[in-house]
Image: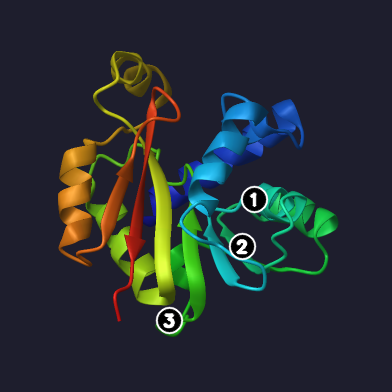
Amino acid sequence: MDAAQKQHLIELHRDSLALYGSTTDALHWASRGQQKVRFRVLAGIGIALGDSVLDVGCGFADLRDWLRSHRLDVAYTGIDLSAEILAIAAQRHPDVSLMCGELFDFDFKPRSFDWVVLSGTLNWQLHDDGAYARRVIARMFELCRFGVAFNMLDARNREMQHLQDLQDLVAFDPDAMLDYCATITPDCSYLGDYLTNDFSIYMRRIA
C-alpha cells in the first residue's frame, strides 16, 4: 500500500465516521449481525481464555467485546489506520493496547502474539492483483505463535462481482488464496459456509 492509497483509506473512514457515527456502518460492514458471524468464525481457530491476540484493522475493537461476551478475556492488541476510529476504540477499551498505523508500520518481533486475526481489512481495491494482501498474510503468520485467521470477500459470488465495481472493493478466489497460504504453512483450512459473500482461512503453525 503506497502513501496515496493509505491516505485515501484514512479519508474514506473519516468521512464514513462523520456520516454514520461510531456504528458498524462507519466501518463499512453490512450489519452488526454479519460482523458477529465473522467474529465467531475467526475465534473458532482456537482462541482461548488468556491468549494474546493481534487484531489487524481493529476498527472500534468490537472483536474484543465479542470475545469478552463469550468469556474469552484475552490480551488484546489492535492496530488500525484511522486515528479517529482508534480514539473511539480507546474510549470504549481504555485497558487494551491500540496502535495507529498499518501492519508494516510496527516492528513487532516474530511470534509476538498467540493469534493474529484480520476481518475485512483486505477488502479494499488496491489494483495490485492481491500483492499487498499476500504480504499482509505472510507478515501475520510471522507474528503468530499458534495461528492466523482472516476473512476475504469471495470472488465467486455474483453479488460481489457487481459490488466490486460500485464500491471499490476487491474479492479473491478462495482456491488461489488457499494455495498461497499453503506455501507458508501446510496446515491451512478453508471455511466458506457461513455467509454467501465471504470466506475465511485458518493458518496454523506446526512447530
Quadrant location of residue 68? bottom right
Tell which tag, 3 or 2, sits nearer the viewer: 3
Q: Which residue is mark 2?
A: 78
Q: Which residue is mark 3?
A: 111
Residue picked out by circle 1: 63
How far from the left and from the top, in percent, is residue 127?
25, 39
Image spot of residue 95 (x, y percent): 81, 69
Would residue 1 be visible to someone looking at this image?
no
**CA distance for labels 2 and 1:** 9 Å
* Residue count near mark 2 (Cα–Cα under 10 Å), binned few <14, some 14–19, many ≥20: many
Q: Residue at x 69, y 35 (%)?
A: 17
142 sits to left or right of 119: left
The residue located at (69%, 55%) in the rendering is 64
**Distance (Cα) linking label 1 and label 3:** 21 Å
Question: For the image shown, how many numbered marks are present on the structure?
Answer: 3
Q: CA distance from mark 3 to mark 2?
A: 16 Å
